[in-house]
Amino acid sequence: MPSMLDAVVVGAGPNGLTAAAELARRGFSVEVFEAAETIGGGARTEELTLPGFRHDPCSAVHPLGIGSPAFAAMPLARHGLEWLQPELALAHPFPDGSAAILTGSVGESAMSLGPQDAGAYRRLLAPYLGHWDTLAQDFLRTPWDGLPRDPYHWARFGMSAIQPATLLARRFRGAKARGLFAGLAAHAIAPTSGIATGGIALLFALAAHENGWPVPRGGSQAISDALASYVRELGGAIRTGTEVKRLDELPPARAYVFDTSPTALARIAGLGHAYRGYRYGASCFKIDYALSGPVPWTAKEARRAGTVHVGPTAGEIEGALRAAVAGRDPRVPFLITAQPSLFDPSRAPEGRHVFWAYGHVPAGWEGDATEVIERQLERFAPGFRDLVLARAVAGPPQLAVRNANYVGGDIACGAFAGLQTVIRPKLARVPYATAHPAVFLCSSATPPGPGVHGMSGHHAAKAVWRRLRAA
């Protein structure tokens, strides 16, 4: 080991591992320290319920993973990452047994919305089809980090993306299109009337048409394992079971890169109240199920989809998100669910299934949402409860214990609200740099924000190697 490392990374989530890989492949010596006994952060797979049932405690479906410029530049397939595409990316069922869908075909997806909105949907998405590669590079970054690669589509997409989803959805007349669009925007874990929620919905819809919403074979852990294998191949070291409480506990290095919350970074690096204005958002109540059979959705399309949004109307979805942000108990939750074992038999014993579902709840909420979540599931899949062999439940306190980056159970590592939507963790020319010249932040608290895409780690690594080469 050299007397001084070039970089130490704290946290072995997808962003920390991406930062380590980016630095190592440019010839820098790198060591990663992870507090947990295993790597992964928000991309893990564990037997949470019964033997042989492999669950994803956090992320499960990865439209931004398969479409990530950072991941695309690394040989992750050679290190074991294989994407599996569900027949349908998304189904959004309605009480009458029908469903809106997202597939690789814009036309097929548009027709599922009904004749009154099919044309409007096609017109909304058509300008961006075939431009994912440049749009992803232009939007999955700090907005002011250089000129866009495709200025025309960047400007056109940006004009729509900055709008609230509720405003952008006014072009639709029917409940199906508006419900589908609100469900996509709800991935921001913020009211769909908030700034830039339209961009979240657009990005997820475009991802479905361009790259699909795949699951990794074997579970989300496969992403982290592939990244770690690549880091090691490049000569980097990864040390698990090592909690870092102070900067001086780490080996001497020219740079320290933190895949942590801004709060933890400030505490460990002695930066005082550097991020005192940073806000964390609402949380989730997550249930992982071991099932004796597939979910008995009334809508036949939902039985072929990797992801199912449960909560039909835009009004219901907005109400559920507003309640969570306002600190109210969930009554009729909007659910994001995933059923990976339909497409990856390795995830459960033969004939059995794993099922993943969460609804939104207030930050730090200590209640039990199992009953309201299962009541909502029964509404669209009667008989669901009869299939439950076991369940693993995690509310905000458990989520925060499982992953220290989830402050108050906020899986997005920061509220998607107000200026913080586009300026996080605070206004700075290089948001990955800190007041300490050798300390950098690479977590989901930095642009472009949450999701298993590694782009925060990619951009932080770029800031680090620019600093190291200038030194």
Image: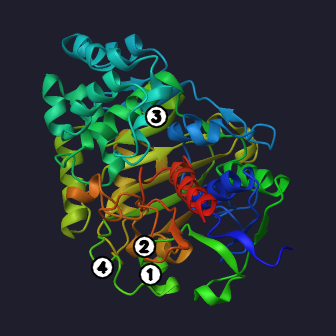
The residue type indicated by label 4 comes to Arg
Residue at the spot 42% in from the left edge and 49% down from the top edge: 448
- 216 shown above or below 176: below
The residue type indicated by label 3 comes to Ala
Would you say residue 226 is visible in this rendering? yes
Name which of mark 2 and mark 3 comes first in the sequence. 3
Question: Mark 1 Cα within 10 Å, few/some/many (few <14, many 20+)?
Answer: some
Q: Out of 225 and 440, give the one closest to the viewer.
A: 440
Residue 136's label in the rendered image is 3
Would you say residue 381 is visible in this rendering? no
What element does badge 1 sit on?
helix
Q: Which residue is mark 4?
A: 276
Name which of mark 2 and mark 4 comes first in the sequence. 2
What element does badge 2 sit on?
helix
What element does badge 3 sit on?
helix
Residue extending farthest to the front is 471
Name which of mark 4 and mark 3 comes first in the sequence. 3
The residue type indicated by label 1 comes to Ala
Quadrant containing the C terminus in the rendered view: bottom right
